[in-house]
Image: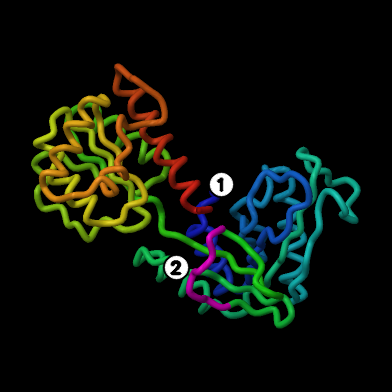
Amino acid sequence: MTDDPEAIVNYAADGAETKFGSALVTLVEIRGGAARALGAQMAVRGDGGYCGYVSGGCTEAAVAAEAIAAIAKGMDRYLRLGEGSEFFDIILPCGGGITLAIHVVKNVKPLRQILSALEKRKRIALRYDSGTQMISAVKSQEKAPGTWSGTSFLRSYKPNLRLVICGRGIELATTSRIGLASEFEVLSLDEASCDFEAGTIDNDTAIVLLYHDLDHELPWLKAALDSKPFYIGALGSKRTHERRCAALWALGFTQAQTDRIKAPIGMFGPTRDANALALSVVADVAEAYSLQRLA
């Protein structure tokens, strides 16, 4: 039970190298409503194992059966479900319809290239050409997870969200725990963590500052503003943020740079306990990342 793209690609790659073979199933068309976005994927092995989701869980077993049949024949195929489908007994609860591309994996190299890029925290895409029934790893230039480019479908991949949390005490511990439960890559740093590498911050990184004083957070803010994380958030009131910005301007940072800081941090507030703060922060980061994927 996972919808982690890296885990799904890895399952397909590993399965293709067994005697059973595997197929990678991709959601390539949505008619009306759907539970998943274009580009959602499943990996299916010829022995019946599968992982991933292309709907809300109502069609996956049927999709796996169709993929196993495709593996046995060694031929790709399209599968239409819901509205416009030949399967009258498979009705999507959302009332819409979806089209799935079932690709029988014959060349595992592109999948291994995807996994290698993600391990290095590089963005990459998988191109599927239904005419030739071939896949290839290409540079990611797409703004959405899945999109058509001519007669090919491009499925873009990004590294796992990296959450760098700087702070101390219960706020740091609780936010780290909820970040891990959300399957983010979490780096939890207290004031003793002075060996932090600024190169750790990339475009898929969120910086969360949970200090209650400006002196401790300034080194982290400088590192964040000198990089390009998709999210920078800091604890404190609006008055505290005014003081924060003034301190950063005195160091030579511009208003355009300090405008990148979300303060007060979080999706809702004010909060007065660690659990509420952690939920507010992690939800805010997740929303920002979701919007950033489509920006």
Determine whether the residue tagged by mark 1 lies in a helix, strand or loop.
loop
**Few, some or many C-alpha atoms within 10 Å of disc 1 (few <14, some 14-19, many ≥20)?**
few
Residue 16, image x and y in percent? 58, 72
Q: Is residue 8 above or below residue 264?
A: below
- Residue shown at 35%/46% (left/top)? 231
Q: Which residue is mark 2?
A: 115
Measuring from the top left, give residue 177's x and y in whole percent: 32, 35
Q: How many marks?
A: 2
Residue positioned 60% across, 68% down in the render: 154
Question: Residue tagged by mark 1?
Answer: 1
User: Is 113 or 257 nearer to us in this picture?
Assistant: 257
Q: Mark 1 belongs to which amino acid?
A: Met
Residue 186 at what x, y percent from top left? 30, 45
Circle 2: residue type: Leu
Q: Give the main secondary structure of the magenta stretch.
A: loop
**125 relative position to 168: left or right:** right
Q: Is residue 106 above or below residue 285?
A: below
Residue at image coords 33%, 19%: 271
Q: Which residues are magenta?
A: 136-144
| Image mark for residue 183 | none
Rendered image quadrant of residue 228: bottom left
Q: State the residue in front, 251 or 140.
A: 251
Give the image location of residue 109, x and y in percent. Answer: 51, 79
Q: Earlier in the sequence, mark 1 or mark 2?
A: 1
The answer to whether 76 appears left or right of 116 in the picture is: right
- Marks 1 and 2: which is nearer the front? 2
Q: Secondary structure at mark 2?
A: helix
Assess whether residue 22 is covered by the magenta stretch.
no
